[in-house]
Image (cartoon, rainbow, N blue to C red):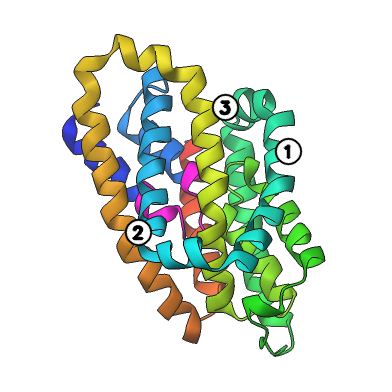
Amino acid sequence: MDYLQSVLLGIIEGITEFLPVSSTFHLIWTSRLLGIAQNEFQKAYEVIIQAGAILAVVFLYWKILINDKKLILKILTSFLPTAMVGLVLYKVIKNIFFENYLLQITVFLIVGIVFILYERYRKNKSLKKTLNDLSFKETLIIGLSQSLAVIPGVSRAGAVILIMMMLGIKREEAAKFSFLLAVPTLFAASVLDLVKLMPILFTQTDKIGYLAVGFLAAFLSALIVVKWLIKFLQNHTLSSFGWYRILAGGILLASLFA
């Protein structure tokens, strides 16, 4: 990895972490296309730049994270199912899901098709509910749907936004909740990974610069995307993300068998 690649990966992390397109999928495939080896340092790098994206949400929504206790309780309730699944399936996630490229592309394509079909056949169901209308039973359902994102290609944000729309929540409100839910979810995942990868960081201190520029790139790009997505979903559907998945997934699938 060089500094240009580090910046590029940081930007991709910041852009895709909060869009319904799967940041993990994009990081894995960008690294693969750039010829960057998936070694232990690379895994640590991806965890650290993810923290940059988390910081962007904290920066934008710190007042809510400090003052809205009821909403925070709902976020933590949604976080619990994901945490349990992540702990139980940690080795499977890292050793199978992250290594099976055909599975990743297949899931990426299927979720894109689900987005398009949902938007086409939801029969103009009105989305009127706000986050204040969420019940704790619904927050558990949201958390269970988010746990599907342990498979690269699903998208944590996509799963959360889609299930919340099915529950009648406004698109922009669903996006906001997915941002806030990312804070405990990604923080916990990052801490778990860093504990396991800390020895690697101590032995490769010459690469700290890569971590710093990647972190900053992820933070800055995430700031832009979080603001943009809220506005976009006020007047647009998930279909555009579905078509993007089909196009990108089709290209990658063809390259896999080329």
Disc 1 residue type (three-letter)? Val
Answer above or below: position of 226 versus 170: above
> For the view shown, which residue lies furthest in the right direction?
137
Element carrying mark 3: loop
Question: Is residue 257 in sight in this rendering?
Answer: no
Task: Give how far across and how far down residue 3 sits, in percent.
Answer: 17, 33
Q: Are marks 1 and 3 in contact (CB under 8 Å)?
A: no
User: Mark 1 to mark 2: distance in Å?
Assistant: 28 Å
Residue 228 location, quadrant: bottom left
Q: Which residue is mark 2?
A: 59
- Numbered circles on residues, count: 3
User: Mark 2 to mark 3: distance in Å?
Assistant: 34 Å
Q: Characterize the local packing of mark 1: few (<14), some (14-19) or many (20 or more) Cα atoms within 10 angstroms.
A: some
Earlier-in-chain disc, 1 versus 2: 2
Earlier-in-chain disc, 2 versus 3: 2
Q: Characterize the local packing of mark 3: few (<14), some (14-19) or many (20 or more) Cα atoms within 10 angstroms.
A: some
Task: Find the magenta span and give its range.
Answer: 13-25
Task: Give how far across and how far down residue 69 sits, in percent.
Answer: 60, 65
At x 62%, y 22%, the residue is 95
Element carrying mark 2: helix
Task: Give how far across and how far down residue 4 sits, in percent.
Answer: 18, 37
Q: Which residue is mark 3?
A: 99
Residue 160 location, quadrant: bottom right
Task: Give how far across and how far down residue 232 sits, in percent.
Answer: 43, 78
Disc 3 residue type (three-letter)? Glu
Q: Which residue is mark 1?
A: 85
| Residue 222 lies within the magenta run | no
User: Mark 1 to mark 3: distance in Å?
Assistant: 19 Å
